[in-house]
Image: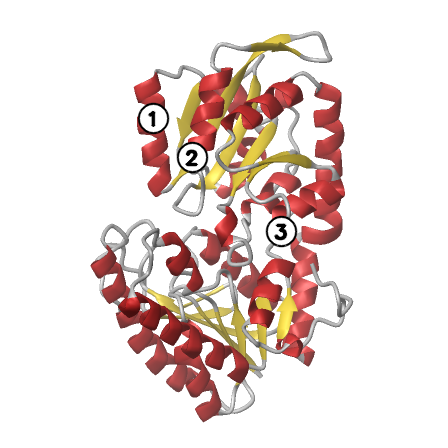
Amino acid sequence: MKVVFVNRFFYPDHSATSQMLSDLAFQLADDGVSITVITSRQRYDDASAVLDARETVGGVDIVRVWTSRFGRDRLIGRLFDYLSFYVTSAWAMLLQLRRGDTLVVKTDPPMLSVIAAPIAWWRGARLINWLQDVFPEIAERLSGAKPGFLSRTLFSTLRFLRNRSLRAADLSVVLGERMSAHLSAQRIPETQLQIIPNWSDGRRISPVVPEANALRNRWGLNNTFVVGYSGNLGRAHDITTMVEAMAETEARTVEGSDAVVRPIHWLFIGGGASMTALKTEVERLGLRHVHFHPYQPRDALSESLSAADVHLVSLRPELEGLIVPSKYYGIAAAGRPVMFIGDDEGEIGRLLRDTNTGRCVREGDGAALAAAALKMAGDDAWIRRAGSRARHVFETRFDFPIAVTAWHSVLRTGRDQTIPARKRS
């Protein structure tokens, strides 16, 4: 049996979905599973990159198909990139699949299951959807404007096609309870849904104490309390609450329980559409205690994630059940608590409450976020305890080997037999 994964980006690309797929594919290949990946010849952050059409890396056969190269800057160009990948990846799936193989499709580009379902049926292959997000609902809820007849018709049609393709699959792997509940409400049978959370790798990321952190020292953050954000900052995330809180804490110093007086600094590592807007606001307000740095190499993640004393995670409440912020897992691996901006009954909000590894504030309540940061900055002992609890939660629920075991079970039996049926997160 061969397992064929399909996603628009794969190694050596370092985008979030690519890293997850690359980690899993290389580990499964190392474990003796025959793995082929169908992907594009591009990188997420460089549409002009041209990767080899065929190569074998780490035991994984990589088939890179041609696509247009308009990039992410304009919607129409992105649509052409999606359409070209649908066509060329469909042809590659037809060529690669044989009866008895397993086809695993992700959600970049969106709605890939609609293309994959008839191909898997035609070739006699098992189909597993690996849903990192739920489309078209995300586009519908982020559109902002009240939908007219044409847009309602479009979204309803896309949802019908998506649901039909999910019902045709052997299984759909989702990231959390809320996502599973949303699809169940769309009449996707519970027997065809399996929760396997995303992960981080505890071998790559481990806690680094502030005094031993070279990045924290290089960035001039010693003797400060650091609120961090790491990763993509996009349309699914709220920056208004962050800006209000940063302005509130700008001139404040806090005496921690270790009797050290220090200012609060805010550290942003990464990129994304909203990161540019955030930088503009910080410059407009003249905030001096806010720092920006680019994405860090994977071998520096222990230090970059540990540079903060507490991390921000954000998700707009209307997107609960459609996205699960995967940055939480790296933060927990680094042994850091979280301040979550969003729905306290959402996937991350409930996790923080149940494990006592962070705090939640409502979107738009910058004063509450500032108050939470000030309170945490004054309680070093709680920060250490919450960080230790976060690392324990990570090791017992979200470490990479746990996910690999679950995926082996799914690929072998069609369900993850290692997780109880009623609660799989």
Left or right: 199, with 76 as reference point: right
Q: Label 3 sits on what residue type?
A: Glu
How dense is the environment of label 1, judged by Cα within 10 Å: few (below 14), some, or many (20 and up)?
Answer: some
Residue 176 seen in the current view: no
Left or right: 292, with 2 as reference point: left
Q: Residue at x 61, y 19 (%)?
A: 374
Image x and y of residue 170, in percent: 58, 82
> Which of the two labelled residues, at mark 2 and mark 3, occupies the earlier sequence position?
2
Image quarter of residue 309: top right
> Which of the two labelled residues, at mark 1 and mark 2, occupies the earlier sequence position?
2
Say if 219 sits above or below 85 in the image: above
Circles 1, 2 touching at the beta carbon (< 8 Å): yes
Image quarter of residue 303: top right
Say if 137 sits above or below 54 in the image: above
Left or right: 413, with 315 as reference point: right
Image x and y of residue 337, in percent: 65, 34
Between marks 1 and 2, how big is the CA–CA gap? 10 Å
Q: Which image quarter is the N terminus in?
A: bottom right
Image quarter of residue 92: bottom left
Q: Label 1 sits on what residue type?
A: Glu
Between marks 1 and 3, how big is the CA–CA gap? 29 Å
Q: Which residue is mark 2?
A: 239
Q: Which residue is mark 3?
A: 347
Q: Label 2 sits on what residue type?
A: Ile
Q: Residue at x 30, y 76 (%)?
A: 88
Q: Residue at x 65, y 38 (%)?
A: 206
Q: Which mark is residue 281?
A: 1
Q: What element does badge 1 sit on?
A: helix
